[in-house]
Image (spheres, rainbow, N blue to C red):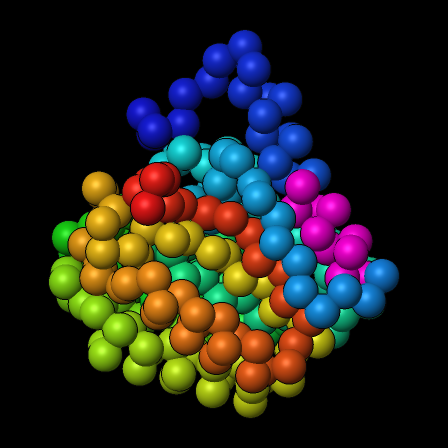
Amino acid sequence: DAGAPITAGTWQAITSSANVALTGQAELRKGARGVFSLCRPPGHHAAADYMGGYCYLNNAAIATQALLDAGAKRVAILDVDYHHGNGTQDIFYDRADVLFTSIHGDPRFEYPYFLGFADERGAGVGEGFNVNYPLASGSDWSVWGQALNDACRRIAAYGADALVASLGVDTFKEDPISQFKLDSPDYLRMGEAIGQLGLQTLFVMEGGYAVEE
């Protein structure tokens, strides 16, 4: 889409971003408990056969597949970006070795519009391994935190060997293009909930546009 233009430096940028995610995956293999991959451009709107929403290669999906290729049996993905990770869902929709969970703005009103509904639960052997939490505009921690708790419960029950968190911070109340109302302390609560899962975790940067705040 128009949010993913191609210029002279695009390929270098997107391959470098994917390699940052793979470097994070490599650090997990060395034994790190948590790694933050500061990927730019982001990736979760890119699928196997399309790109959009500032995303070209799906950094989180590439790192997830690398974890599986390195011996993980099951990997969970938690996408906390304001916008649904449609590309990530698309890539793993018919697979049981990846549990995809996403908390996001209702796609009836928010990008990407065509994916991210609660009735999308996976296909074939992947049925039941795709969980979406579309939330209303204006949702704050009282609502968002409940969705996170349920997602963490599902991740714990799944028995994953590792967790990949698509960390979008456009859920922040001051974000210029998003409509959730999380405040700074809420991200500490988010981190505590993720930490209690006790999984090796790779955080891959996605959206977030209130840069100074």
Identity of the residue furthest to the top in this view = 8
Residue 48: give x, y in percent of width and height.
54, 43
- In the rendered image, residue 82, in percent from the top left (x then y), is placed at 31, 55
Magenta residue check for 28: yes
Q: How many marks?
A: 0
Kindly indicate the quadrant of the structure image that contains residue 10. Answer: top right
- State the residue in front, 50 or 153: 153
Most common secondary structure along the magenta stretch: helix
Q: Which residue is drawn at the image coordinates 41% and 21% (left, top)?
A: 5
Mark yes or no: residue 90 visible.
no
Can see residue 159? yes
Q: Which residues are magenta?
A: 20-29
- Asked if residue 197 lies left or right of residue 114, the reply is right
Q: Is residue 87 above or below residue 127?
A: above
Answer whether residue 194 is magenta in the image.
Answer: no
Image point 46% across, 37% down: which residue?
55
Q: Quadrant of the N terminus?
A: top left
**Going 82% across and 67% down the picture, which residue do you hit?**
31
17 w.r.t. 126: above or below: above
Residue in the picture at 49% in, 67% down:
78
